Image (spheres, rainbow, N blue to C red):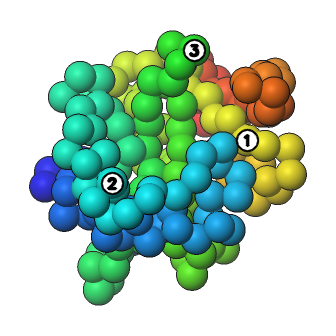
Amino acid sequence: MCTLIETDRFVLRELGPDDAEEMYALNADPEVVRYTGNGPFASVEEARAFLESYDAYRVQRMGRWGVIAKDGGSWLGWCGLKRDSHGEVDLGYRLHRRFWGRGVATETGAASLEYGFGPLALDRIVGRVLPENHASHRVLQKLGMRRVADQVEDGVVWQVYALGADDRMGA
C-alpha cells in the first residue's frame, strides 16, 4: 500500500482490504464510535467490502489513511481528509483507545492539514465535532482551527471548526 505522509512517529498510508480486521476491531469499540455518528461494521467481511470499494484516493486524491507507528509498526487507527456531503473537505481521525492521549491525532492531523494545504492546494478544511467530545475539540483547537458554526444533520448538532489556507500564512 502506498505511503503518503510521514511524521516523526507515524506513517500515513492508504487503507486496503488487509486492514479489515483492524477496521472492524476499531469500530467495534463503543467508546471509539461514541461521538462519530456511525456504528460498527457487522463483520470483518463487511469492513473488507467497505475497504475494497473505497475509491477516495483515486477519485479525490485524498482519503482516510491508516496510521502506522514507525516504532514497531502497530496499526493505530486512521486519520485524513475527505470531501463530505456538504462539499467541504473534512479532517477526521479515529484511533484505538489504547493510543488516546498520546498526541497521535494532533500529529497526524497536522500532517493531514499540511498535505491538504500543500499538494492539494485546498482553501479550507473543516472538522465536525459533537459538543460533548471534549478531546476532539482540544485537538482541532491545537491544530489552529476555530469554531465557525453549528450544523444540524439528521437531528444531530455538530460544531464545525475550520482552518483556511490564508489563516496559516502567519503561522
Residue 157 percent location from the top left of the image = 83, 31
Q: Nearer the viewer, residue 113 or 63?
A: 63
Residue 169 percent location from the top left of the image = 57, 25
Label 1 environment density (alpha carbons within 10 Å; few <14, some 14–19, many ≥20): many
Quadrant occupied by the C terminus: top right
Label 3 environment density (alpha carbons within 10 Å; few <14, some 14–19, many ≥20): few
Specify the label residue 46 is tagged with.
2
Q: CA distance from mark 2 to mark 3?
A: 26 Å
The residue at which mark 3 appears reads as 86
Residue 152 percent location from the top left of the image = 79, 23
Q: Is residue 122 above or below residue 63?
A: above
- Quick one: label 1 or label 3, which is nearer the N terminus? 3
**In the figure, residue 8 lies in which quadrant?**
bottom left
Q: Nearer the viewer, residue 140 or 18?
A: 18
Specify the label residue 69 is tagged with.
none
Q: Residue furthest left?
A: 1
Circle 1: element type? strand
Q: CA distance from mark 1 to mark 2?
A: 26 Å
The residue at which mark 1 appears reads as 129
Identity of the amino acid at label 3? His
Q: Residue furthest bottom?
A: 72
Q: Is residue 56 left or right of residue 131?
A: left
Q: Residue at x 79, y 53 (%)?
A: 133
Q: Is residue 1 above or below residue 91?
A: below
Q: Residue at x 32, y 65 (%)?
A: 44
